[in-house]
Amino acid sequence: MGYLRLASQTNALDDRDHFLEVAGHLSYRRASQANLCVLSEIVKDQRVLALLDPLKGRGPNLARAEVAWNDYRWSPSANGKKIALLSDSDPGHIQILDTEGGRKSAIGLKGWQVQSTSWSPDNQHLYVSGGFGSGFRVASVDLNGKVKSLLDVPMGQGWPADPQPSPDGHYLGYVLRLFEANVVMLENH
């Protein structure tokens, strides 16, 4: 059993910290344009997504999903109305969960091994990264599954991951792992 410390940032006069009891590995994400946080907790080999109020604690559960090998595999939309979930068992699909009604839909990406996803600020498409063909790709995907390739990196030349848009949507940052060397030496340490 562990605790998540939630410090009050909404009221400068309230310096009390709040604690949320958690049972397993957890992470959380904030919807950038909404007063909404989503908590992801791994419980009994399942990812449980729940609303999270920093002052009141855990809210209702939104969904259960399989546990993925990395934590880049889910993201709330900017307005907090949808969550994108990726699956290790079906890496060519993105599951979309409606946080208000609980409805689920899926976007199929033929030939992809999707590894990470994030929402655009306009809530109309996702940025995805992952294996595609004989390399790696970063792309924009609308909610109907239309893909616009943004970057292709041949296998062995790098691995782009975790695309994140700027708040205005004009820029896209991502992690790029390069494979230029396989040995690093630190001296005098």
Image (spheres, helix red, strand yellow):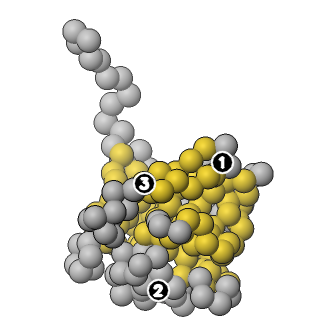
Amino acid type at circle 3 is Asp
Q: Which residue is mark 3?
A: 17
Amino acid type at circle 1 is Gly
Amino acid type at circle 2 is Asp
Q: Nearer the viewer, mark 2 or mark 1?
A: 1
Residue nearest the observer in this picture, 102 or 35:
35
Q: CA distance from mark 3 to mark 1?
A: 21 Å
| Residue at screen point 47% across, 67% down | 55
Q: Which residue is mark 2?
A: 142
Q: CA distance from mark 2 to mark 3?
A: 40 Å
Q: Which residue is mark 1?
A: 24
Most extreme residue toward the right is 44
Q: Quadrant of the N terminus?
A: top right
Q: Nearer the viewer, mark 2 or mark 3?
A: 3
137 on left or right of 19 = left
Secondary structure of the residue carrying numbered label 3:
strand
Most extreme residue toward the front is 13
Q: Quadrant of residue 92?
A: bottom right
Q: Nearer the viewer, mark 3 or mark 1?
A: 3
Q: CA distance from mark 2 to mark 1?
A: 33 Å
Q: Does residue 72 appear in the picture of this structure? A: no
Q: Does residue 103 appear in the picture of this structure? A: yes
Q: Pointers 2 and 3 in contact (CB under 8 A)?
A: no
Q: Pointers 2 and 1 in contact (CB under 8 A)?
A: no
